[in-house]
Image: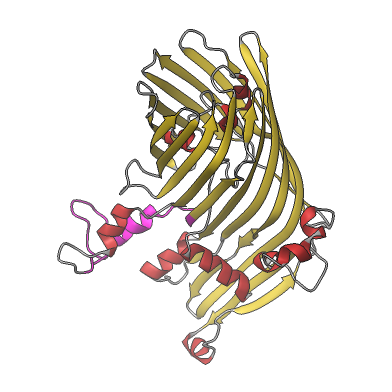
Amino acid sequence: MRRPLVHIVLSLILFSTSWAQVHIDARGLGLCNAYTVTSRGISAVGYNPANLGFTDEVSFSADIFDFKLTAYNNFMSLALFNQYFTGDRNGDPIDLEEQMPGQDKTHKEYLLGQIPEDGFAVGLGMTVPLPLLNISYGNYAFSSSIEYFQNNSLPKGLFEMVLEGNAVGKSLDLSIKQDLLLVTNMGFSFAIPFEGFHLGATVKYLMGLGFAGVDSSGGSFSTKATGLASDGFYRYTSAIGGNGLAVDIGVTSERIGNLQYGVAINNIIGFINWGNDQNFIAKNIALLESMVPVRRMFQIPEDSSIFSQSTMYFMEMDEVNVTGALSNTDSLFQVEEKPVPVPDGIQMNYPAILRIGASYKYEEDFVVMADLSAGLDDYYFADRKWRLALAAEWIRFKMIPIRSGIAFGGFYGREASIGIGGHLLWFDADIALKFLGGMSFTGAEGIELGVNFKFKK
């Protein structure tokens, strides 16, 4: 019981959950992901492979170094932290029971209102394309990367209990969430030019390194006149070693005057089969664990040949009063662990995303872009809420392009980005920063940082 709970708590403390999207380079990040039409060369892979067909713009490209990091929570911004956790103007702690100036609520009620009803979540995601193994030439490209996603959340009721106590007769939801996914993918992409438009596709082999998470949880904590009661439960499932396949498709029009349009679906087919012994990780587990303790990371027993595990945990408390709590200070909960059978193979669908985009180029001065996107699934890096992104790139001085964008909807609600590049002959360097859940550094609840160096012709 303790290991999964410690894992969840440490993950939250270390800010390590993720809502990262599929890989996008620093240029696309600076454009707030309005990239369905304007991505070119190796940058088109994972977004819209049809853009590989524009070889008159980019005939060759190769990543030298490419990195993207996402860190996010859905509650705390720097402005909110400074307001409530650094004291008032005299440095004294703020009285949360006081009324907010000009409002009919206390500071405590305001803080609780900022936490979403489905709980407090924090996030970290990372995508690292493998150096020199991401190359486009003509209409074709080969790509490979390591992608890490993790997602943890705690129920809002826990924060209500800390700030308000637990009133007699009131129940607090004990549902929690956790997802962790580590995947390496290798893809082959191509584009086929037609009169007036280009079609493209990417076929990716997904080598799953491991996944873990709470796939079922619930129960409540309540205070009765006779004592405290709880019937919380959660099921923790993990597996290592997976084989999978994913397919992206896209179409982009030729430029119609100054306008251009495109549509893409990432992972229109996408799945990973986990936990069997017929995969690279399982067959080479001894060699792999001489470098990385994979089974320990995903809580798989190291003394067996199984590569998946599922355990149900029950946290029960039956009307524990003050006397009972003082007599058992080690644990108020009666904890029970029950192994749950798992099938030989676990199939996971890889999330799909629909993208619709357009761009307008004004002479050689700037390009304006718009993207509308939504996930066809609602987990990991996909979200069913529609997201609209608007961006512009100033290209008058081609050696130093400047980019910026904003977005509304989707998982983060509001986003703003800024980026700059340095282009010299065949070498491009780009850096970008995006604010998540807000339009400024102090108002944002997270950031995305991207750095990219590549050869391009």
Q: In which quarter of the image is residue 282?
A: bottom right
Quadrant location, the C terminus: top right
For the image shown, how many numbered marks are present on the structure?
0
Given residues 129 and 3, the one toward you in this image is 129
Above or below, comparing residue 18 to residue 285 in the picture: above
Q: Which residue of the protein is positioned furthest toward the left in this rendering?
A: 90
Looking at the image, residue 41 sits to the left or right of residue 391; the answer is right
Is residue 106 visible in the rendered image? The answer is no
Q: Position of residue 327 (x, y in %)?
A: 52, 92
Q: Which residue of the protein is positioned furthest toward the front in this rendering?
A: 425
Looking at the image, residue 285 sits to the left or right of residue 230; the answer is right
Above or below, comparing residue 298 to residue 131 in the picture: below
In magenta stretch: residue 400: no
Residue depicted at x 62% and y 61%: 217
Given residues 214 and 64, the one toward you in this image is 64
Above or below, comparing residue 174 to residue 47 in the picture: below
Given residues 182 and 169, the one toward you in this image is 182
Q: Where is residue 37 in the image (x, y as percent from the top left)?
A: 53, 23
Quadrant location, the N terminus: bottom right
Residue depicted at x 78% and y 66%: 286
Looking at the image, residue 442 sits to the left or right of residue 89; the answer is right
Residue depicted at x 41% and y 49%: 446
Magenta segment, prevailing SS (helix, strand or loop): loop
Residue depicted at x 41% and y 34%: 421
- Residue range (magenta): 93-122
Q: Where is residue 5 in the image (x, y as percent from the top left)?
A: 58, 70
Coloring applied to the structure: secondary structure
Given residues 23 and 284, the one toward you in this image is 284
Above or below, comparing residue 167 to residue 182 in the picture: below
Q: Position of residue 435 (x, y in %)?
A: 39, 43
In magenta stretch: residue 94: yes
